[in-house]
Image (cartoon, coloured by chain):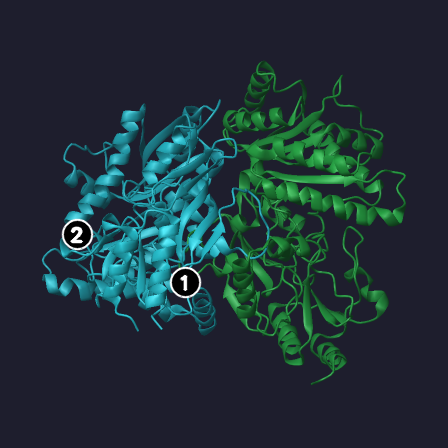
Chain colours: A green, B cyan
Amino acid sequence: MRHPSDLVDILERQLGERGVLRAPADLARYVCDWAGDRLGMPLAVARPASTAEVAEVVRLCHAHGVRMVPQGGHTGLVAGALPDADGGELVISLERLNRIREIDPVNFTMTVDAGCVLDTVKQAAAEHDCDFPLSLGAQGSCQIGGNIATNAGGLNVLRHGMMRQLVLGLEVVLPDGRVWNGLHALHKDNRGYALAQLFLGSEGTLGIVTAAVLRLCPRPDQSRTALLGLPSVEAVVALYGLARRDCSDLLTAFELIPRRCIELAMEATPSLRDPMDAPSPWYVLMEVAATGPVDLGVMIERLLERGLERDLILDGVLAGNEAQAQQLWQFRESMLEGQRRRGEHLRTDISVPISAIPAFVEAASQAVMAASPRCEIIAYGHVGDGNLHFNILPPADMAEADKRPHLHDLEERVFTVLDDFGGSLSAEHGIGRTKQAAYLARLSPLERQLAGGIKALFDPRGLMNPGRILPPR
Amino acid sequence: MRHPSDLVDILERQLGERGVLRAPADLARYVCDWAGDRLGMPLAVARPASTAEVAEVVRLCHAHGVRMVPQGGHTGLVAGALPDADGGELVISLERLNRIREIDPVNFTMTVDAGCVLDTVKQAAAEHDCDFPLSLGAQGSCQIGGNIATNAGGLNVLRHGMMRQLVLGLEVVLPDGRVWNGLHALHKDNRGYALAQLFLGSEGTLGIVTAAVLRLCPRPDQSRTALLGLPSVEAVVALYGLARRDCSDLLTAFELIPRRCIELAMEATPSLRDPMDAPSPWYVLMEVAATGPVDLGVMIERLLERGLERDLILDGVLAGNEAQAQQLWQFRESMLEGQRRRGEHLRTDISVPISAIPAFVEAASQAVMAASPRCEIIAYGHVGDGNLHFNILPPADMAEADKRPHLHDLEERVFTVLDDFGGSLSAEHGIGRTKQAAYLARLSPLERQLAGGIKALFDPRGLMNPGRILPPR
């Protein structure tokens, strides 16, 4: 058995100085995610600059029995790409694989390296009058490879689907260093088992995605945004059904926002004014987008009329131009900042059937308030996906040391209610390490066996991002 | 080792008389597919009426070491669900699992048994003002379980995706009789590996799908259909890019039809008149559909104007009402009948990048005509999916016995050209047995190992639809 530090020396010779980082100061930005979470230091950080270099790094790790952590933009938030506390993992950062390989606007596809930042990909598509329709808060940092590994969702899923629906082909370095070339630019392809689908959402545990063929759509040339005040979550869900129909499925966003989030947004960004004369208990931030001769103004006005007639809407603001639309979106962004400023809090990322959202919010709120009457619940999310961030701020005067166990207890209560509604405890972010205990507690023996079998098939030595999704062997 | 015929006796006791067919006359309709292909007779046909009965049948087959063939509506056309020539396979027909279990129009989902016929599912959705947007020629016969097993495509993929995009959850009986309950009605769910995706397109080789949660969309309340004449395949592809933009992605169909197919349609249905004053070398049958306040007439007229201005369109017919639209669609249906009447011919089901369609059609036609100057090429298909049925009618006076080997030789020539374009030799129908040799010849050792490993993980004894996709062990 060779020594792991020998491996780092070999990597340095293979990849050059820019390709390997080992000084603690250089490692700092690879051990911490967006939320500030960290576990430990890696053996080193490898920064291969090509698929061949990724394959070489993986082959060497495999030969040395060294565990690997593929890493993108640090925005996954479930500790899936953070190096382990024991210091024995090699981080493989994809950041230098950042070429747009090809854009084919006639085929509505582009081929990109895994380390491309999502915003860069979106801009490159826009230059060809196309849109890559994945939209996330983290799009300025997150990388396509991470989006694939976690099957990313975001704001526009109701129209365009998750990452799973937006990927046509993949190139993957398997845990032993062999390269699978599945970079097909085909909209339809039914040859055998869906290997690419298996890598999507596998959180880097089956191999390292090095490139992908992405599906594009025409770039919208017009959009309209509205912020609406509603009396109840029931009204929000009813309005969603109406909006799907009245807006001819041109709906790109339909975000649920509670009153408390509007207040948090105004706290965080003092220039924001209360958007309507009177506060509403719930708000919806919605957007429609189109290309070609569709009058989105008429469309959205008719929806508002019909919503008012049916008492689904109390009041609303329709953005008259792009600047006003951005101001409305500012509420969505600032409310996250306002939440962050409140310090330690519980973030969840759950989904239920859309029809169950009102009853779930009611039941989960009751369960939480019964156990912790002075906490604050902030439930916002993507209505069209049944995806809620049912978050909890602990009482402001609670001792810091008590907050984490208290919130953990509340999380379990929320998950127990969720089980009754047939919900998912990870709608968007995946399992990583953070959700693992709750995930495994709900996994049937059959599912555990199949998941373990898939892992063992691709990674028999258990070296590729081990301990994420499933426990290490 | 117990004898297979013992198994049939046991099954008869378990499932009752309606549940097992063994008389040759009763088996006739289970051994032949839509195209008239057949291989051999099964041991018997089991017709379980519930998931529990399917599980019991599978458990017994597993215990007796008897091979199983799950069977839907016989419309797959790659011999994937036809019983083997050796008479040792038990057909498991899903036709009695035909309940619509639940429709949730607020969640835009429905839960159905695998044996439900696609048309029945579509009608049930329509009663709730929803649409299940999978549309196939075979929709009056094909079953949802078969659609899932083959990841079915069809006419509306460019708008709504393949079956893979339309399934949220599955219930599957595994090859040893255990039941996997993955019937989640969640639009977003990132818990671990994508098991459901693996079953989609696995052609019944990993287990038997018994139920599914399907994704619905609002039912369109208006549509417009046009048949356009175009000068070239290049013009067809250029018009497609224009149509995606001018029709705000409300395009539901964009079908390529060569002049020869219009003639075949008129031969098969004499009441059809040549649709325009002068023939065009190529036609496009297109449809847009919407809900809510969108003026599809204005939309499609502007597209026609812009297409005429740019010399992409030579002439066109816009249906003024539903009856006229159906008449235009009649060309699409009758051309298939006209093709069928010409007797033995080569059907392919291939895909290339959309941008490569013109060059591929040119190159493949040249390769075929060089080898067989008197055959007729009929290339039609779904432009938005890059999916062509590049079919070949042999010379009419060729001896019947010579046709099959001749067509097989031409198919290989077409596939060789396809390889140069990075295409797929099975866009929609899957591999089954018919495409297996060509598929395996192009599979890399790595892909072969992974596919074999997946099969072995789910079906270690190799009893579930063996010999389809991969060779039997």
In the image: residue B172, left or right of residue A410: left
Can residue B425 be seen at all in this image of the molecule?
A: no
* Mark 2 or 1, nearer chain start: 2
Query: Which residue sits at x=66%, y=76%?
Result: A61
Nearest the eye: A71 or B467 = B467
Q: Position of residue A155 (x, y in %)?
A: 63, 40
Q: Position of residue B281 (x, y in %)?
A: 27, 43
**What amino acid is labelled 1 in the image?**
Asp
Return the chain for callout 2.
B
In this view, B130 is above or below A100? above
In the image: residue A155, left or right of residue B84: right
Q: Name the residue under label 1.
A: B176
- Could you say whether the residue bearing mark 1 is in a helix, strand or loop? loop
Nearest the eye: A178 or B361 = A178
In the image: residue B427, left or right of residue A324: left
- Residue furthest to the front: B13
Q: In which quarter of the image is residue B331?
A: top left
